[in-house]
Amino acid sequence: MEEDPNGKHPMSATTHIHQTHTLSHEGNGRKISVKVLRQSDPRGGSHWETFEVPYEPGMNVTTVLQRIAANPTNAEHEHSTPVAYDSCCLEEVCGACTMVINGRVRQACSALVDSLLADSPEGIELRPMTKFKVVRDLFVDRSPMFAALKRIKAWVAVDGYHDIGPGPRISPREQDEAYPLSRCMTCGCCVEACPQFNDHSTFIGPAAISQAILFNAHPTARVERDDRLAVLTGVGGIVDCGNSQNCVKVCPKDIPLTTSIAKAGRDTTLYKIRQWFGR
Ligand code: SF4
Ligand code: SF4
Ligand code: FES
């Protein structure tokens, strides 16, 4: 069953709207209306606050947040606080700045203001991802994703730092299959869109499933293949995937998540058959 990946962000009961979007001009300078869902701490309620940020050509959403930090005066001319958000690489590689921008989960550093305004001239709306605990404002705690990577042993095991010579050769065909999966930046877009990944489920999520497939294909990491398949076969594993395919539609790295999920389904079935026969 298909579900709208962007249709599940109800405002919390404590949310209230300060002001509707406007794109205004002040003096000669065009201003962008930026509405932010703010939360001061993990246990607090949330509220909307609007800022008007001077437009600059070529801005991205991270630049907008930097301009707010430099002058945290809101649209009602009240002195406010800088909006908290996470970021690192500023080039859509680390995944840290993922947030929901105009209803779509994506990275702030690669969200260009010109194209956002072309689609939505009334302004920009920013809110944190809903599948993770909010640390503050737009900054969420993605540690459940890293915990999932630990569960499936998303690494190539080595037994020391001594010289063990060159690793096994990986054919160009194997490289072509592995490379797209290796581009995962643990950003959280796929789990944000996944209806099965929520507070009430232990589902490991599509990113971790895909990484298990990646490492099981590596000639050295394959030594822990059955440990990964045991996790995918267990509670919160592959059977929890409802095959809605929302994840693959929102992945900014175009990772073939549903192909990985299908392969995980086949591999876990073979793993269980081998278990039954004691192999
Ligand atoms: S699979 Fe794609 S959407 Fe999911 S965490 Fe990795 S890069 Fe992000
Ligand atoms: S296909 Fe599976 S992992 Fe992807 S969004 Fe649907 S339920 Fe989630
Ligand atoms: S800062 Fe790294 S993806 Fe945006």
Image (spheres, grey):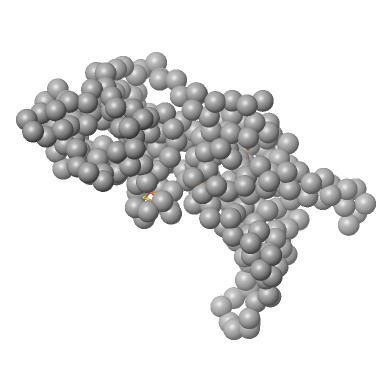
Q: x and y percent of residue 257 in the render?
A: 62, 45
Q: Residue at point 26% right, 22% down?
A: 21
Q: Residue at point 50% right, 23% down?
A: 7
Q: x and y percent of residue 208 in the render?
A: 61, 47
Q: Residue at point 63% right, 81% down?
A: 166
Quadrant in the picture for the C terminus: bottom right
Residue at the extreme right of the image, as rendered: 277
Q: From what the image shows, is residue 272 above or below residue 113?
A: below
Q: Which residue occupies the foreground of this view, 96 or 102? A: 102
Q: Quadrant of residue 107?
A: top left
Q: Which residue occupies the foreground of this view, 58 or 46? A: 58
Q: From what the image shows, is residue 91 above or below residue 172?
A: above
Q: x and y percent of residue 123 in the render?
A: 28, 28
Q: x and y percent of residue 161 in the render?
A: 56, 78
Residue at the extreme front of the image, as rendered: 118
Q: Which residue occupies the foreground of this view, 271 or 31? A: 31
Evaluate whether residue 200 shows in this view.
Answer: no
Q: Quadrant of residue 41?
A: top left
Evaluate whether residue 114 shows in this view.
Answer: yes
Q: From what the image shows, is residue 106 above or below residue 8?
A: below
Quadrant in the picture for the N terminus: top right
Q: Quadrant of residue 226?
A: bottom right
Q: Is residue 180 left or right of residue 233?
A: left
Q: Residue at point 59% right, 60% down?
A: 179
